[in-house]
Amino acid sequence: MGTQSLLWNSVKKFLTCGLIGLTISDRYASIVPVRGASMSPTFNPRARNFTDDYVLVEKFCLKKYEFSHGDVVVFCSPSNHKEKHIKRIIALPGDWIGTTHNSHDDVLKVPKGHCWVEGDNSASSMDSRSFGPIPLGLVKGRVTHVVWPPQRIGLVERVFPQERVSSFK
Amino acid sequence: MRLLSYMGQWKSAAKEVLDRTAIVAKFLCLLHVTNNYLCSPTLVYGPSMLPTLNLTGDVVLAEHVSHRIGKVGTGDVVLVRSPVDPRRILTKRVVGMEGDTVSFYVDPMYSQTTVVPKGHVWIQGDNTYASSDSRHFGSVPYGLIQGKVFFRESNELRITRF
């Protein structure tokens, strides 16, 4: 009898903590691991055998969906909704972005409600250069800080190739 | 002496306030998880889904389980985040899944045929004359689907099931 109520109490506590954790990670912030080297040297700078980088993702940006050039964001892949990718926003709706298509240079206008994302490591990154601009509705959060490994804890800077983007407002 | 007893009362009152706040916070978390992962009532309005849904507004129940496990299919009415404005959520019907060939009328004379790419769906409003949907902005990625509508609460006494 005593152990049954103890078990029930621990199940209740576990569920409560789970609910609170889920709410906080959906609405405020969460910590996610970064897999792969498509954002080197910002995340996972060398082919590290030890551990992936962990980053802090904030969800306050999802109230207004207002992003700036150079924001690193987490988004659902447009070809597989179960996968999430981390890339940098290079161009916002209405911008003109210079790309290379079939070895000739091209200029594309980012449609309304979409953004152009690219990985920092252009050599090995599946990004908007292959699947085109993505709707901003797919963005699930913005990366603000690196929290692991301890020697690289810090703010994630906003940098982007200004020479390839032009925005007329 | 009086100070000590006041501090004791203040401490117990503060504890009670914290307990009540904790209960409210837990309830709000439960509400958030239910609304986002199970089922939520939503008000939908607009002409694009006539005659299925009302122009002036209908309260519908949308469930948020099917789209996470990939069970959304052709013919379902879904809530979709607009690819043109991420702050708006649209209510449309799924007319084609990935790999399907969809034909639609660009204007009354010409029809166009497209294949829905991998990971995307083709959505259209039931009222084709007053709906801005995939015929205008193309296939939308499956990841934009927020939920599937399965129940409509109607002003009349009859309740419609989808």
Image (cartoon, grey):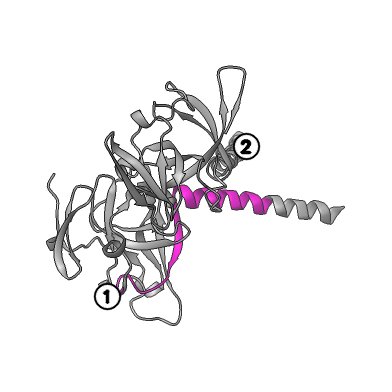
Query: In this picture, is A2 found above or below B81?
Result: below
Dot label at residue A123? 1
Q: Report if residue A29 lies within the magenta region.
A: yes
- Is residue B57 highlighted in magenta? no
Residue underneath mark 2: B16
The residue shown at (32%, 63%) is A87
- B92 or A31, which is in the foreground? B92
Dot 1, crowdedness within 10 Å: few (<14), some or many (≥20)? few
* Mark toward the viewer: 2 or 1: 1
Q: Categorize mark 2 by other alpha carbons within 10 Å: few (<14), some (14-19), many (20+).
A: few
The image shows residue A47 at horizontal and vertical percentages of 37, 81
Query: Both on one chain, marks 2 and 1?
Result: no
Instruction: Decide which of B49, A75 is in the foreground and name it.
Output: B49
Counting every numbered tag in the picture gives 2
In terms of image quadrants, where is residue A98?
Answer: bottom left
Magenta highlight range: A13-42
